[in-house]
Amino acid sequence: MSTKAEFVTFRIGGQIFGAAVADIQDVFRPHSIAPVPRAQREIAGLLNLRGRIVTAIDARTRLGLADRPADAPAPLAIGFERDGETYGLVIDEIGDVISLDVGALEHNPVNLDPIWASVSLGVHRLDDTLLVIMDIDKMLGLVGVDASQAA
């Protein structure tokens, strides 16, 4: 009997990624992101989400991709919480929730971009593409927050 896990899929720069449903608290459209002076480039800024201050992380910048085209649809964000702090990962579009066989997770291909590989738990082969499974904690670690060391 195979063990299944559910993932939320999303696109960043044309690539499909997935994150464990259990990690995701919310999907929202960020409005009025306030820049943070002298913050790392990956920090898009701060926003107010239902009375909570959320640190918005630009996934495109974090993954070394070009800025979102000016004519692209407004971005979305997936929200998650770590150690009492709320974060929003700014993405291009949200996909579906899919159920995948845990045993089918493969190691990252050797030619996967090193930045992408550093935030990936592995890949799942879908019909016509690879689904890169994102490690949210590692995404946080790359922007100067180590979730295992946070106070």
Image: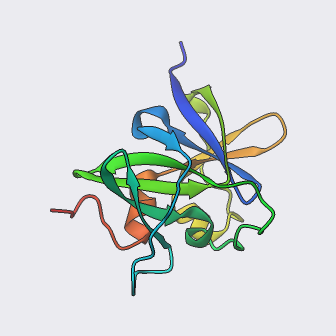
Q: Is residue 91 depicted above or below 124 in this figure?
A: below
Q: Position of residue 65 (x, y in %)?
A: 69, 71
Compared across the picture, whether 21 is left or right of 112 comes to left
| Nearest to the observer: residue 35 or residue 66 | 35
Q: Which residue is located at x 44 percent, y 52 percent? A: 136
Q: Which residue is located at x 59 percent, y 72 percent? A: 61
Which quadrant holds residue 120?
bottom right
Q: Position of residue 76 (x, y in %)?
A: 60, 50
Residue 11 at least partly seen: yes
Q: Is residue 118 depicted above or below 48 in this figure?
A: below
Q: Quadrant of the C terminus?
A: bottom left
Residue 102 at least partly seen: no
Q: Position of residue 103 (x, y in %)?
A: 56, 30
Which quadrant holds residue 90?
bottom right
Compared across the picture, whether 87 is left or right of 133 comes to left
| Nearest to the observer: residue 106 or residue 26 | 26
Q: Is residue 18 depicted above or below 92 in this figure?
A: above
Compared across the picture, whether 81 is left or right of 70 comes to left
